[in-house]
Image (tube, coloured by chain):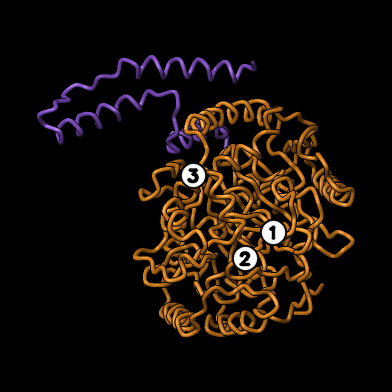
């Protein structure tokens, strides 16, 4: 495996670890709408730390960081 | 080839803007010339997707009235432009090269058009394009294929096919294209124009038809680097309506043009970018390197990361997958309204495993870091051929008649798609003509947000050569 492949495997394992025990707070069967809101909020917060950053905004920030520093 | 200096249509965008400012020609006169040329050449070139002469002349009259009043006018004031038919303008149709969207009337105007409006540019026509911008040859099975003004038997390149043909044929002074896998740079190369694919996130895509949101970029096709810089200056910058746009300050591109290029390090790739290059292309591209040496640039051989070899295919995977998500409903309900090639290429994306798609996006971040460290740690810009082959004929590049079309598409986009995958800026510069009379170009690739440096290098080359002054004839 190349270093990139190894990084990917690590990322997959981290991702599984994060989500296998995923249990958002405030999820109540008696209040489905509230539960959905809470689950969505918890999901968004969890996603911030995901190794699989599919959000293009994150990619733009990476490009920002790689821009020339001595214009 | 002609250089018809007497005809105002043959001026550059910058020259037209300067002449308008002197009052020696009015915007109405210039617009009338462009409208007449659009109509006169459309049978041969098939570039018009939509033309409202009354509206175009009304814009011109308003520009002339504003100039008569005086005050602060934008640098593009009164200059007739026309754009790829995928930039929405409220209340005006935008068919995106398709039958499916033939009746679509947007309820908002794209940020790119609003920003050009703010600088006084006129938007006089909608230009034909590849169906839903998904194709690099320029063929369009559903609304017809624009023709290359240098030789109408040859492809324009795509997907900004009408933009390339119209600007090269002097039917307007500049045009917006979009670039997801080469769709600005390829038509620019095939039609002998300057085309800038900016850094991902440099120009807002709000109000532009999406193809693949992780790759889509907006940029201009023009006859000179200066013209390109003028248009880019108008459209670049953060837009809250497109959350992927960067908040990095926009460079003063015109100021960059006047800076010295002596001592800049120009990288020549030792691997990948010259794979399969035709001898006549190699000769012209290497001659452009000699020009840069004469200008005082330092030519540095550089090895690019081996991972570049997979970026072409990975860009296709992202495009098909994200494109399929945009088109899922139409693929299910109106499949027969697509051209066969577009339908087939989009449908492939419905079957991409989510895990593979996400893995590719993850790899992208690793690879752009690696590429910037390994390549731009040593050089200021990378110099490559834009296409590795001479401009093919329409028949040669007709995918419907070519059973090996997937490989052929990969070959056409060989040197453009890595830039999309990595999100890096790429500037196409014409550098001569192959023996069949079709244009040839090189590409300058830079660090993220280094459009200004690429413009500086491109402008220096055009100051030392006259390829950009040639026009397809007869006028």
Could you tell me if the residues under marks 1 and 2 are in contact, i.e. CB atoms within 8 Å?
Answer: yes
**What is the number of the mark on residue B400?**
1
Dot 3: few (<14), some (14–19), or many (≥20) neighbours within 10 Å?
many
Give the vertical position of A35 relative to B437 (above or below): above
**Residue at image point 10% right, 29% down:** A30
- Give the quarter of the figure containing the N terminus of chain B: bottom right
Residue B52, x across and y down, in percent = 48, 81
Could you tell me if the residues under marks 2 and 3 are in contact, i.e. CB atoms within 8 Å?
Answer: no
User: Which chain is assigned orange?
Assistant: B
**What is the number of the mark on residue B324?**
none
**Visible in this render: residue B442?**
yes
Give the structural element (helix, strand or loop) at label 1.
helix
The residue at which mark 2 appears reads as: B141
- Give the quarter of the figure containing the C terminus of chain B: bottom right
**Residue at image point 42% right, 80% down:** B62
Label whose residue precedes the other's in the sequence (1 or 2): 2
């Amino acid at each position: 495996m190349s270093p990139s492949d190894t990084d990917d495997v690590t990322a997959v394992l981290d991702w599984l670890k994060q989500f296998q025990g995923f249990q958002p707070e405030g999820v109540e069967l008696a209040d489905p709408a509230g539960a959905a809101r809470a689950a969505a909020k918890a999901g968004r917060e969890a996603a911030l730390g995901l190794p699989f950053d599919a959000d293009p905004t994150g990619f733009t920030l990476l490009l920002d960081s790689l821009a020339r520093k001595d214009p | 080839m002609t250089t018809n200096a007497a005809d105002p249509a043959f001026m550059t965008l910058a020259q037209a803007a300067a002449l308008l400012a002197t009052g020696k020609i009015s915007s109405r006169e210039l617009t009338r010339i462009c409208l007449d040329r659009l109509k006169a050449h459309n049978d041969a070139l098939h570039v018009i997707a939509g033309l409202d002469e009354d509206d175009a002349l009304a814009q011109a009259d308003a520009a002339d009235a504003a100039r008569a009043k005086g005050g602060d006018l934008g640098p593009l004031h009164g200059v007739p432009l026309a754009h790829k038919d995928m930039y929405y303008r409220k209340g005006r149709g935008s068919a995106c090269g398709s039958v499916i969207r033939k009746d679509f009337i947007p309820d908002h105007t794209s940020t790119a058009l609003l920003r050009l409006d703010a600088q006084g540019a006129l938007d006089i026509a909608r230009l034909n394009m590849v169906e839903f911008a998904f194709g690099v040859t320029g063929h369009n099975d559903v609304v017809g294929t624009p023709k290359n003004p240098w030789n109408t038997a040859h492809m324009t390149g795509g997907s900004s096919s009408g933009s390339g043909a119209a600007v090269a044929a002097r039917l307007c002074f500049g045009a917006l294209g979009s670039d997801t896998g080469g769709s600005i740079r390829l038509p620019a190369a095939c039609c002998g124009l300057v085309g800038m694919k900016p850094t991902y996130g440099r120009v807002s895509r709000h109000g532009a038809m999406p193809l693949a949101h992780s790759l889509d970029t907006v940029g201009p096709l023009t006859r000179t680097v200066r013209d390109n810089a003028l248009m880019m200056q108008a459209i670049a910058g953060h837009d809250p309506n497109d959350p992927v746009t960067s908040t990095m300050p926009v460079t003063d591109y015109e100021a960059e043009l006047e800076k010295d290029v002596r001592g800049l390090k120009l990288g020549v790739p030792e691997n990948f970018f010259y794979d399969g290059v035709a001898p006549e292309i190699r000769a012209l591209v290497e001659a452009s390197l000699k020009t840069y040496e004469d200008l005082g640039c330092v030519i540095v051989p550089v090895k690019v990361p081996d991972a570049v070899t997979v970026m072409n295919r990975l860009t296709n995977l992202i495009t098909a997958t994200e494109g399929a998500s945009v088109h899922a409903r139409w693929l299910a309900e109106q499949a027969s309204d697509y051209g066969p090639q577009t339908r087939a290429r989009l449908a492939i994306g419905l079957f991409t495993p989510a895990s593979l798609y996400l893995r590719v996006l993850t790899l992208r971040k690793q690879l752009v870091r690696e590429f910037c460290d390994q390549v731009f740690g040593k050089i200021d810009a990378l110099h490559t051929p834009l296409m590795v082959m001479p401009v093919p004929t329409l028949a040669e590049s007709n995918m419907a008649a070519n059973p090996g079309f997937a490989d052929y598409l990969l070959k056409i986009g060989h040197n453009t798609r890595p830039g999309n995958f990595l999100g890096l800026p790429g500037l196409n510069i014409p550098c001569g003509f192959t023996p069949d009379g079709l244009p040839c170009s090189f590409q300058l690739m830079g660090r993220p947000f280094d459009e200004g440096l690429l413009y500086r290098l491109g402008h220096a080359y055009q100051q030392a050569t006259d390829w950009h002054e040639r026009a397809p004839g007869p006028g």
